[in-house]
Amino acid sequence: MMKFLTITLRGIRNFDQRRIQFQDGLNIICGPNESGKTTIVDSLLFSMTEEGQYVRDLIQWDSAHSSITLQYETDEGGVYTLTRTLCPEEKSTLENTRILEDEGVIRNMLREHFGCISRIVLENSAVVKHNEMEIMRKMGSRDIVKKQIQAFLTGGTKRSPEEVMETLDRSIFQTDRALIDIDNEIEHEHQNLQPYLGATEKYEKLANEKTVYQEDMTRFQELLETYKSRVQYGNLVQEIKYLEKTRDKAEDSECYVQLIPFEKIKENENLHRELEATEEKIKAIIINIEAREQELKRFLKEKGRKGSFLSRILGPLLAKPPRSEETEKKIDVSKDLLEADRIHLNRMEREYREAQDRIRALEIEIGSFRGKSHEELIHIKQEKQQEQRVILEGRTMEEITAFISRRVNERDELRSTIFRRNSQLLEMDDEAVKRKLEELEQKIIWLADEIENIKPELEEARIGKGEAEKISGRLANMRSQKEELSTKKEVEEIARKTLEEVYIGLKKKFIPQLQERTGAIFEKITRGKYTELVIREEDLEVFVKTPGRLLGTSTPSQGHEDQYLSLKIAHSALSQGTKDQLYLSLRIALSNIVSGGKTLPLIFDESFYTSDKSRLKETFAVLQHIAQTNQILLFTHNEEFLGYGNPIALASGGQ
């Protein structure tokens, strides 16, 4: 039995380096999508065939070295190592007891080992492709014959080739009639379409106009909001100026009231009264001084008379002092009093001058209030307070200050918003902004009118477009039906020709070998349950024989009435498991024929993707039996398959 031992991939697609070891019998290679299952199948086929068009597809894009090494054992028991180097240069080596490098010699050796080194032939014999088992179960027998006689193998039909070709002729005639009918229907629908020609274009044009109007309106409305914000900003600026001016007037009134010099006026009045009193005192002191000066003069005069020469001589001799001593004392007292009055006068004059200086200073400080009485000042204060109340309109200074602060915050936030949207608006004059605002409002009104005006025409165009689409849809379906009918006719014409070639030409050359080898394999797989198999040449009907009795309902062909039973794969003359056994027998036989009698390993690449559990159980029973004589490599994503054979796990990304 020929078998693969190992395959080593270096720099092949997603595989940096991976060595996979195969066992005798049934090998289950399991991994998710993108895990490298298809890469391994392609690498096996490439190793056996080395068809150059697949080289670039296998090389890893960033790898400096790419190679595939396949170790296999031939039917004769020889172990060979085949290395295909793809990068940096293409070359091959085949090693057994010696290393072969000549391409021609290697190719001849591989043909001797595998029997066939054509990739196409191997793909249609030793390889069972994606979900092929399930597809074959669903195919009609005629399709199976056409496909399997040339590439695989399948069962046949009860009818003769002549009956099949007659049926095809009738079908081709009916198809021609149907094509004529559908052409008439297409012409009729074309006439129905005439009134609506251009409706789609008109609808799209009007819809585009409406969309443009709506977009313009949206844009203008957004711009309008910005200009409204700018107007609001300008109003806030003016309002803040007015409020600040009002506050300043109120502050001026308050400051005026605070500047009314009540104390200084009162002090000035007191100083004037004191000045008058001081002036009276000064006059009194002056009068007093003048009296004392007169008195002093009188004392001095009196002293002059009593101070004669005789008095001065006789005075000491007299018992009593002379009267001049009393006069002296009076003079001294008079002088002292006069001096005191003069000092008092000086002090009073100084105080008078100081009072005058203070009065002059106060009058300067009092300013415009000079000459106003205290009562007049009270009246002025009351007038200013009333004026402040009128200015503030019943609010306090704290309230108007807080209100101004809120308005300033609103102004600043609005300014920031306008700056982000359109900073140039902040530089525009308020009147220019208002004019632009009016223009935008007029444009929006015009656009709204245009949108309303276009709606009826758009609705009419929409209805026309809908009718045109319905008719076009029917036309498309009819054209599709026509295409399907045309394709059906071409297929049936090709099928008729192919059937004739297949039944008459290929069956004479191919059927005898296939019949003999399939029958032997089928008998072995079924363990003698079916001992013989015949493929009838005239209609490719398949017959099987069981020891001692016949199975099925078909009528035996002439000359085989007592030996064989007709088996039509499209119907259940046998169980599905037996059909699968027969199908696999046909594939093994086909592989054996194309390989020149070699027991090539069989490769199943996701062949049972949609099979249900009951069919899988039967199928794996058949595969396990076949695996006794042929190595099987079954590639799948289904982890439930791993228990049926030697498990080989692949990870996502080719690890």
Image (cartoon, grey):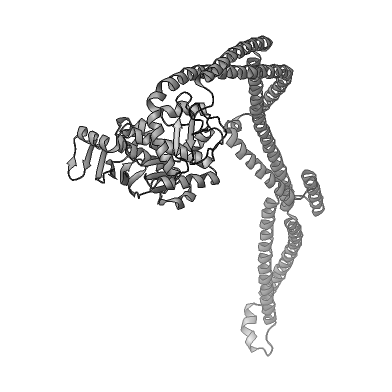
Q: Nearer the viewer, residue 411 or 369?
A: 411
Q: Nearer the viewer, residue 36 or 620?
A: 620
Question: Is residue 80 rendered to the left or right of residue 200?
Answer: left
Quadrant (top left/top right/bottom left/bottom right) for the N terminus: top left
Question: Is residue 154 rendered to the left or right of residue 103?
Answer: right
The location of residue 358, given as percent across then percent down, is: 67, 57
Kindly give the residue lying farthest to the bottom in the view shown: 319
Up-down relation of residue 121 to residue 7 (above or below):
above
The location of residue 190, given as percent across then percent down, is: 64, 11
The location of residue 144, given as percent across then percent down, is: 48, 29
Q: Nearer the viewer, residue 563 or 479?
A: 563
Question: Is residue 241 rendered to the left or right of residue 483?
Answer: right
The location of residue 480, given as percent across then percent down, is: 58, 19
Up-down relation of residue 388 to residue 187 (above or below):
below
Up-down relation of residue 467 to residue 430 (above or below):
above
Q: Quadrant of residue 89?
A: top left
Q: How many marks?
A: 0
What residue do we see at 70% from left, 41% from top? 245
Q: Is residue 124 visible?
A: no
Q: Is residue 14 visible?
A: yes
What residue do we see at 47% from left, 31% from top? 154
